[in-house]
Image (tube, rainbow, N blue to C red):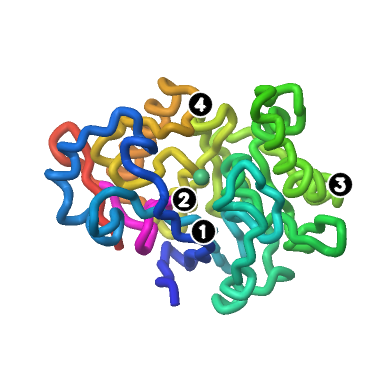
């Protein structure tokens, strides 16, 4: 059973989908320095790096926020039955994700908002599920909230590099059915309140239109940062971009702003890909930062 966090009047629960253990640190972080491992092995191994110290451990999951008024899912992992021929780890998955959501006390019908930080293979998959030959929204009563710039970029196959155009299928099977069902709402992340306690801030870099979700209740706060970080290593090395970050300078700036916010606001960070509980706190240490799971 996943831990449930209390932030003000709300509860926050992770809904797990997959554990990843296939990324080596020098693949995920082109600037990787093996010295990092000797300085940080005590917390890295075995929860965040395998015991033989060759591969990083990461998680793919959603976050469930329950407030008095709303049942909200943030990001929807990779999804079942999706054709992902270029990415075997996500190809035709069959995981009990919706059963895990039910085990947390929530049926798909109860979700009234699905918020997507960005449109990547491992963040939008459970937007839809297969019925016969069609893809239908997994959450029939939900409004799906997308950053406007992300949806506009991803909806045009001409924007994809020719050697990556196969990835347009993500839009076709996980986004378009939601748009066609009239369940999509596009937002410009500007920090204004979208729902009670919920606001969006721009964190471009990993993708052009990525947004983070801020949740505040009774003076407490949580931040859902999308892919501003892929592993807690980046709390200690905010200048290291992942191999997936599209705009290096913007990604570094967004990460640093988020870390400063997390430390100064003492906000719970709900990560997209950290292993273990996937959540914790950032504190300042010298001119840098420190991470602690909770
Ligand atoms: Zn991701």
Q: Does the residue labelled 2 lie within 8 Å of ligand 1?
A: yes
> At numbered mark 3, what does the secondary structure look like: helix, strand or loop?
helix
Residue to which mark 4 is pinned:
246
Residue to which mark 1 is pinned:
61
Position of residue 3 measured from the top left corner of the image (x, y, whole percent): 40, 71
Residue 121: mark: none
Q: Distance between the residues labelled 2 and 4?
A: 17 Å
Residue 70 seen by the camera: no
Q: Between disc 1 and disc 2, whose residue precedes? A: 1
Judge from the rendering whether residue 247 lies leftward or rightward of residue 74; answer left or right: left
Q: Between disc 4 and disc 3, whose residue precedes? A: 3
Q: Nearer the viewer, residue 185 or 9?
A: 185
Q: Distance between the residues labelled 2 and 3?
A: 27 Å
Q: Characterize the local packing of mark 2: few (<14), some (14-19) or many (20 or more) Cα atoms within 10 angstroms.
A: many
Q: What stretch is highlighted in magenta?
A: 268-282
Quadrant of the rendered structure where residue 105 is? Answer: bottom right
Q: How far apart are marks 4 and 3 (CA)?
A: 29 Å
Residue 272: mark: 2
């Amino acid at each position: 059973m996943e831990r449930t966090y209390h932030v003000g009047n709300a509860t926050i629960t992770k809904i797990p989908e997959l554990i990843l253990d296939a990324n080596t640190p020098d693949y995920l972080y082109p600037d990787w320095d093996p010295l990092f491992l000797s300085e940080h092995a005590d917390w890295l191994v075995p929860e965040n790096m395998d015991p033989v110290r060759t591969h990083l451990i990461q998680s793919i999951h959603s976050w469930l926020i329950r407030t008095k008024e709303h049942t909200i899912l943030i990001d929807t992992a990779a999804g079942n039955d999706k054709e992902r021929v270029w990415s075997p780890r996500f190809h035709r998955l069959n995981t009990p994700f919706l059963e895990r959501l039910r085990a947390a006390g929530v049926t798909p019908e109860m979700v009234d908002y699905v918020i997507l930080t960005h449109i990547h293979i491992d963040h939008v998959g459970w937007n839809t599920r297969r019925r016969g030959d069609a893809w239908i929204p997994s959450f029939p009563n939900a409004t799906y909230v997308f950053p406007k710039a992300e949806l506009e970029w991803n909806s045009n196959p001409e924007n994809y590099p020719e050697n990556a155009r196969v990835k347009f299928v993500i839009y076709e099977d996980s986004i378009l059915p939601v748009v066609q069902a009239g369940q999509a709402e596009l937002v410009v992340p500007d920090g204004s309140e979208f729902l009670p306690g919920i606001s969006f801030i721009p964190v471009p870099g990993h993708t052009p239109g990525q947004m983070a979700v801020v949740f505040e209740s009774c003076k407490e706060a949580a931040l859902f940062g999308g892919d501003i970080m892929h592993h807690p290593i980046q709390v200690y090395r905010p200048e290291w971009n992942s191999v997936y970050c599209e705009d290096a300078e913007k990604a570094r700036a967004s990460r640093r702003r988020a870390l400063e916010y997390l430390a100064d606001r003492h906000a719970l960070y709900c990560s997209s890909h950290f292993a273990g509980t996937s959540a914790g706190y950032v504190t300042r240490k010298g001119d840098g930062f420190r991470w602690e799971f909770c």
